[in-house]
Amino acid sequence: PVLVVDFGAQYAQLIARRVRETQVYSEVVPSTESVDELIKRNPAAIVLSGGPSSVYEDGAPQVDPKLFEAGIPVFGICYGFQAMAVALGGATEHTGTREYGRTELAIAEDGGVLHEDLPGHHPVWMSHGDCVTKAPEGFTVTATSSGAPVAAFENVERRFAGVQYHPEVMHSPHGQEVLRRFLHEIAGVRPQWTTSSIVDEQVALIRAQVGDGKAICGLSGGVDSAVAAALVNRAIGDRLTCVFVDHGLLRAGERGQVERDYVAATGVRLVTVDARERFLTALAGVTDPEEKRKIIGREFIRVFEQAASDLQTEAGQSGEHYDFLVQGTLYPDVVESGGGTGAANIKSHHNVGGLPEDLQFKLVEPLRALFKDEVRRVGLELGLPEVIVHRQPFPGPGLGIRIIGEVTAARLDLLRAADAIAREELTAAGLDRTIWQCPVVLLADVRSVGVQGDGRTYGHPVVLRPVSSEDAMTADWTRLPYDVLERISTRITNEVNDVNRVVLDVTSKPPGTIEWE
Ligand code: XMP
């Protein structure tokens, strides 16, 4: 792999993603790993990420000069670039002039491998207080900026290079090309990380792990569990059984999509548990958001456990047990939970609403190394329908946390109808890929006066919450075209009884969260 050494920046994961976009496999590792440990992982190249610190601060992470004796190609970014300069005998200075944000990069006469033929002046994203003032011996300086006399350097023979700016962010329009040139042309890494290679590799790994065993998987209706199950199904066929819990908090058409389209595309063995009554009963009279979440999570676990134990009992008669549980854990979850080493840190059960750790299963997590966009590509490669692979994120507690107030069957029907209209119109307008998700929220305890036909109405408002985001950690409200908003509003108020007002949520995250509860 290409190892991205994380100096504590929020950028390390993004760098790893960008490396993979050049079809090279990459992993994030903490900067506390010793050079010997890094070498043991047999890296094709190492990228030193940016970081919040100054190389002059006490306790600032340093780069062990031994790293540069190992014959491994190294690329330094921002802080990593400065640390690299220091370790190789160049100089950095604390000049006090900060460059932050969009900055103009000037390419030197000799643009080297990294910057040759790029526009002589082009924008890059900078974020630094210190700067490199002297490149190490044997390095060519290939770019400068007003705050960084040495903004990029390279030593092609030793396969080392670095840049002061952040090539991984979209505000550096040529950054991806620079990263690609380093990896393919300077480091000589071959682009072999493709979707079909991911599928082949995972199928082989799953077969090796599960052997003749049997596995079970909770399908949530989300992308991750759907793709994880499809992969495991490809590997072990009908020794996998999927359990889909219909908690009655699903969107219109979702159960059918799983039972019909998903099964048709994958051939998985599916058991649906109809638990609608059970959830409604448990939620009766509850209005507090956290309490709703707890109840839904708890009931989900009980239903799933019951289904799993029924399957065990059935299987027990023929002698074979379900030893494995498939989870759709993604790479960002692994990195964020401090994992990355494949250790037993079992955190991310959110795909199936939080399964307890004392369920007696060994985990199969075929997406542990993948980012969301890779998961989607794997899903398409496995033949899953677009409607499943490109569906919007949908919270485990479902529509239960989109009804502000008590959850009842009638309110769920109302919200389902309004949500279906909003989704239909957004899809028809070609906006599915522009928005990240668009929750529709029913303010069930609010009423307002309206007029329809000749009569007064006293109905409920629904809120449209269209957001744009890269990872749901932060989000901006999406500027939807007025004509689309108008169609959604007209149709909802005409077609959904008891809703007489449609309002638009124009709050970013922060301060608002994406969901209302
Ligand atoms: P918030 O509301 O926290 O949501 O800004 C961030 C993203 O997470 C989704 N979400 C959930 N997903 N279980 C899930 O699987 C949950 O309990 C849950 N709560 C929120 C939300 O839809 C958004 O994409």
Image (cartoon, rainbow, N blue to C red):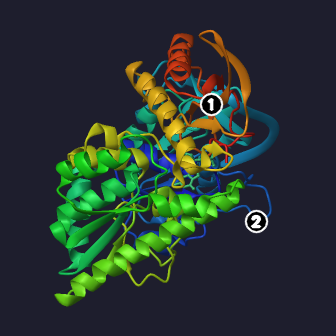
Is residue 450 visible in the rendered image? The answer is yes
* Position of residue 46 measured from the top left corner of the image (x, y, whole percent): 46, 56
Going 50% across and 33% down the picture, which residue do you hit? Answer: 419
Q: Nearer the viewer, residue 515 or 151?
A: 515
Mark 1 Cα shell of 10 Å, populated few (<14), some (14-19), many (≥20): many
Helix, strand or loop at mark 2: loop
Q: Is residue 237 left or right of residue 59?
A: left
Q: Amino acid at mark 1?
A: Val
**Which residue in the structure is indicated by mark 2?**
59
Q: Is residue 152 left or right of residue 155?
A: right
Q: Quadrant of the N terminus?
A: bottom left
Is residue 30 visible in the rendered image? The answer is no
Helix, strand or loop at mark 1: strand
- Residue 156: image quadrant is top left
Q: Nearer the viewer, residue 359 or 210?
A: 359
**Which residue in the structure is indicated by mark 1?**
462
For discs 1 and 2, the disc positioned in front in the rendered view: 1
Mark 2 within 8 Å of ligand 1, using the beta carbon: no
Going 29% across and 38% down the picture, which residue do you hit? Answer: 386
Sequence-earlier tag: 1 or 2: 2
Q: Is residue 75 left or right of residue 231?
A: right
* Position of residue 182 measured from the top left corner of the image (x, y, whole percent): 41, 42
Pick out the residue farthest to the front. Answer: 455
The Cα atoms of the two marked residues, 1 and 2, are separated by: 52 Å
